[in-house]
Image (cartoon, grey):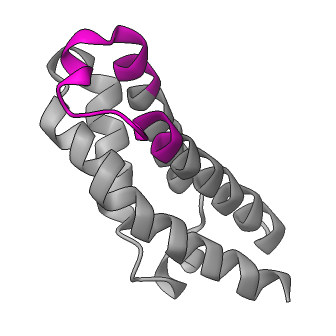
Amino acid sequence: MTRRDDTIRLRHMLDYAHSVRRLAEGCQRADLEHDEKLRLALVRAVEVNGEAAVRVTESMQQSHPDIPWRQIIGTRHRLIHGYDQVDLDLLWRIATDDMPPLIDQLTAILNAESG
């Protein structure tokens, strides 16, 4: 895989991190209990974010140890394989607490990569 491929995957991660934030915007944790579309959309966006992270090369991941790669990838695995046991509190914390700093980190990496 090339550096360009990593840049594409990082861009995908950033795009889906933004999607997670937009979906959660104006919502409350309790909305996940009653809004199936919101719940399914957040799960899917977090899954794709993790899938993109899986495809980032190990060397790129090692170059940016401040990104919680293992947690992002592990969350993807838990959502895919434990689809019937999604922890909505954790999903909400990811959407509201974890995505803003991830967006900042990915933006900084992509800005540095572009020049």
Q: Quadrant of the C terminus?
A: bottom right
x and y percentages locating residue 47 in the rendered image:
44, 36
Q: Residue at x 35, y 68 (%)?
A: 68
Q: Is residue 31 magenta?
A: yes
> What predominant SS class does the magenta segment belong to?
helix
The answer, for residue 114, to whether it is visible in the render is yes
The part of the chain drawn in magenta is 20-41
Instruction: Report which quarter residue 26 is drawn in.
Output: top left
Q: As drawn, is 31 to the left or to the right of 62?
A: left
- Please state the total of marks drawn on the protein image: 0
> Residue 50 versus residue 100: which sits nearer the camera?
100
Q: Residue at x 67, y 50 (%)?
A: 12
Q: As drawn, is 50 to the left or to the right of 98?
A: right
- In the image, residue 17 sits, relative to residue 111, either above or below, namely above
- In the image, residue 16 sits, relative to residue 55, either above or below, namely above
> Residue 65 versus residue 33: which sits nearer the camera?
33
The answer, for residue 55, to whether it is visible in the render is no
Q: As drawn, is 49 to the left or to the right of 112?
A: left
Q: As drawn, is 12 to the left or to the right of 62?
A: right
Residue found at the very far front of the displayed protein: 26
Q: Quadrant of the N terminus?
A: bottom right
x and y percentages locating residue 17 in the rendered image:
52, 51
x and y percentages locating residue 102 in the rendered image:
45, 66
x and y percentages locating residue 10 in the rendered image:
65, 62
- In the image, residue 18 sits, relative to residue 4, either above or below, namely above
